[in-house]
Amino acid sequence: MSAAIQAELERCVRELHSTDPSVQAEAAKAIQVLTTSYGHEDAVVRSGALPRLIELMERGTVGVQERAAAVVANLAVVAETARAAAQAVVPLVQLLSRGRLAKEIAAEALANLAANPGEDQRGTITAAGALGPLVDLVKGSSRLAQENAASALQNLAADHPENARLITEAGAIGPLVELLRLGTPLAQERAAGALLNLAVDPDSETAMVRAAAVRPLLKLLTRFPPRPRAQQRAAMLLSCLARQHTLEILKHGNAIKPLVELLNCGNSAVEESAADVLFVLTLHPRGWSEAKGFGMLGRAHESQSPKVRLLVDPMYRKGPGPGKTSELVALGLGSHAAASLYI
């Protein structure tokens, strides 16, 4: 760190202790710039600014709270400073119930903190009471707040079955499905990821089907322009739901065709996720008949992916029949396996 940066940080820390809110806000803004554009997160933590920023998040004016929270959001991105930033969890949760900008920044900061799986920050965030306010933001707030709240719920549930259960109990499934239907493209992508991480047991999967998740998931597969990450997440979630709810998916007359078309979309991750769904849906005679009619066998045969080509491999693909789902899952087919998603 240069002498100039050191001097700038020392000045900012002094001004954070000013009694003038405008001076506090300018100091927090300067620190925010240092952590946004110049990668001085570790230096900010070592400067001793963080405890004062947390105090200002709790007792400062609205503008100062927002600036201080933005610094914490930046610190939470970097694994080396995320542990220190986790000290701000309680005031961040409180900001989820304040003004529009405060909600957006606080949800982003919590999403960033929850994306660091090396620490138990996800449990800390849940214990601080974040789930209810985050679900409320998904239900209705600014577009950015919805996107950030969905990201936070997605990250909190990743590789954390207890959090997934608590998020489901907090009533998140219905609002996330509604976000799938009406949210921005990024919100839809993050809602699909959150629902995928919540699909940890048959009860939660049934709740998603009852909340009418299938139709918006199918629409994500055919959205134009395509968003590969959203398509992959939608296909992975459909693969989970298909194991217990094949008929509910097939009754939507457009279920098979978009999945078959994705087998040659040019994105290997999306192609293989689509194949996962088809492995399960084509165990049903109706799914098998429709898939053949839409050219699944030819597309699979032409695929460059060994996994997609298994759709026509005689060892695994002998036409429909009962009792094959567990066999496919054992082979790693028709399942999203351990692919918990962050961000």
Image (cartoon, rainbow, N blue to C red):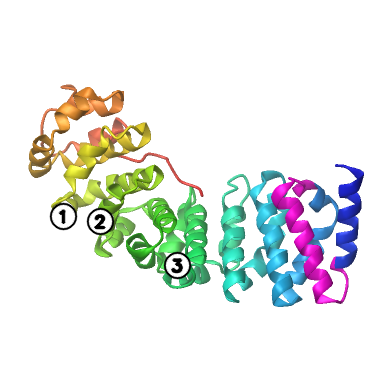
Q: Looking at this view, is 136 or 158 the one in front?
A: 136
Callout 1 environment at 10 Å: few (<14), some (14 to 19), or many (20+)? few
> Percent position (x, y) of residue 231?
34, 45
Q: Quadrant of residue 294?
A: top left
Residue 31 magenta = yes
Q: Which residue is mark 2?
A: 214
Callout 3 environment at 10 Å: few (<14), some (14 to 19), or many (20+)? many
User: Which contiguous range is marked in magenta?
Assistant: 16-42
Q: Amino acid at mark 1?
A: His
Q: How many discs appear?
A: 3
The secondary structure type at the circle numbered 1 is loop
- Find out whether the residues at labels 1 and 2 contact each other: C-beta distance under 8 Å: yes
Seen at 43% across and 58% down, the residue is 187
Mark positioned earlier in the residue sequence (1 or 3): 3
Q: Is residue 63 left or right of residue 24?
A: left
Q: Is residue 114 left or right of residue 204?
A: right
* Residue 290 vertical placement versus 300 (above, below): below
Q: Is residue 26 visible?
A: yes
Q: Is residue 57 left or right of residue 249?
A: right
The secondary structure type at the circle numbered 2 is helix
Q: Which residue is mark 1?
A: 252
Q: Looking at this view, is 226 or 304 the one in front?
A: 226
Seen at 28% across and 57% down, the residue is 216
Q: Main secondary structure of the magenta part?
A: helix
Q: Which mark is residue 138?
A: 3
Mark positioned earlier in the residue sequence (1 or 2): 2
> Percent position (x, y) of residue 225?
34, 47
Callout 2 environment at 10 Å: few (<14), some (14 to 19), or many (20+)? many
The secondary structure type at the circle numbered 3 is helix
Mark positioned earlier in the residue sequence (2 or 3): 3
